Amino acid sequence: MTMNANDLLLDIRELTIHYVTDNGTVHAVEGLNLELGRGETLGLVGETGAGKTTTALGITRLLPVPPGVVRGGQILFDGEDVLLKDEEEMRSIRGGKIAMIFQDPMTSLNPVMTVDKQVAEMIKLHRKVSESEALEQAAEMLDLVGIRRERLRDYPHQFSGGMKQRVVIAIALACDPKLLIADEPTTALDVTIQAQVLELMKNLKRQFGTSMILITHDLGIVAETCDKVGIMYAGRLVEYGDTKSLYDNPNHPYTVGLFKSVPDLEEDCDELSVIPGLMPDPMDLPSGCAFHPRCSHAEEACSRERPVMIEIEPGHFIACPVRARALGKA
């Protein structure tokens, strides 16, 4: 995964994050390598516990400490390692250059502050403007996300879930960040409102030229929204490529299992295919390839050697030497 340095906005190298608890160490992210270009949208997909949200919290330096500990690696944003920044520098980066949208808008909004003041607060933090200028910019931003001016002085409890998420998007994009991280932004919304919010995010991302990481477990949302896809399992990236290539030709056994578990409207079947077994205990990950206990392609070496990413077609990588060998790429 090597991109031209001028086109590269985010470059994560061998990132390892653990949660150290009284019961043991949770291996949340292990040796993660990831690239994101300027203006690109990357979908991070995986089961609960795959390490998607921990990766996002690592990028924004919002890991709960304790128990979160970055054990190693680099997170290069615009060529600078955010892991080397002090807290004051990170405060100027968060919101100003990197913004995050969380899945539950109610936990992101202040219940006793009107929505225009919440957007204006973000603007004042990162721009040298007066209170009245910040409020006017907030009104313009809220108008962009579809909230009328007569509702600017309303409180969060007066809005529906979808409208609250629009306010959160307005706050996130208020200072024109270079990177937007959306962590399951539509989970709490019904399907119709999900589609509206995603379309809004796509349009605003294009308008502002923002790069985006979309964290989800919904392969349909990724297909509609993302340029590239990264499939995560047990803290590691197992497959990565542009959306069309990966969807047309999924190759890692875990990715294939995910796609087979999605209902196909054109096929008549009695029951869905499932991946055997369960996600491993993050305190006790299997040796070698973490997926090998559940994998029908596993060989003896899979339990001993940690797989590296192998390019099977231009820009399409898998962490599976068995499949790569079958394709004549290993």
Image: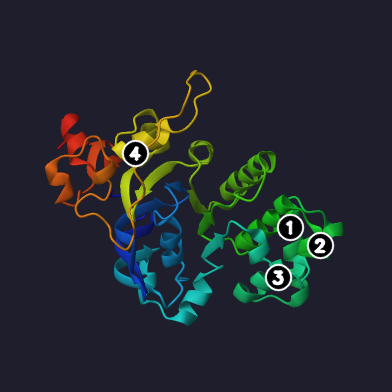
Closer mark to the observer between disc 1 and disc 4 = 4
Q: Is residue 213 above or below residue 27?
A: above
Residue annotated with mark 3: 110
- Real-space Cα separation, disc 3 to disc 1, in angstroms: 16 Å
The local secondary structure at tag 3 comes to loop
Toward which corner of the image does residue 72 lie, by quadrant? bottom left
Toward which corner of the image does residue 172 lie, by quadrant? bottom right
Q: Characterize the local packing of mark 2: few (<14), some (14-19) or many (20 or more) Cα atoms within 10 angstroms.
A: some
- Real-space Cα separation, disc 2 to disc 1, in angstroms: 8 Å
Residue visible at 53% across and 22% down in the picture: 265
- Real-space Cα separation, disc 1 to disc 4, in angstroms: 46 Å
Q: In terms of sequence position, does the residue under pointer 3 or pointer 1 come before the other?
A: 3
- Tell me which amino acid carries mark 1: Leu
Count of labels in the image: 4
The local secondary structure at tag 2 comes to loop
Q: Is residue 145 in view? A: no
Contact between labelled residues 1 and 2, with CB atoms less than 8 Å apart:
yes
- Tell me which amino acid carries mark 4: Pro
Report the side of 310 relative to 34 (left or right): left
Looking at the image, the residue that sits furthest to the right is 150
Residue annotated with mark 1: 142
Q: In terms of sequence position, does the residue under pointer 2 or pointer 1 come before the other?
A: 1
Q: Characterize the local packing of mark 4: few (<14), some (14-19) or many (20 or more) Cα atoms within 10 angstroms.
A: few
Residue annotated with mark 4: 276
Where is residue 33? Give x, y as percent.
30, 55
Residue annotated with mark 2: 152
- Real-space Cα separation, disc 4 to disc 3, in angstroms: 43 Å
- Tell me which amino acid carries mark 2: Leu
Closer mark to the observer between disc 4 and disc 2 = 4
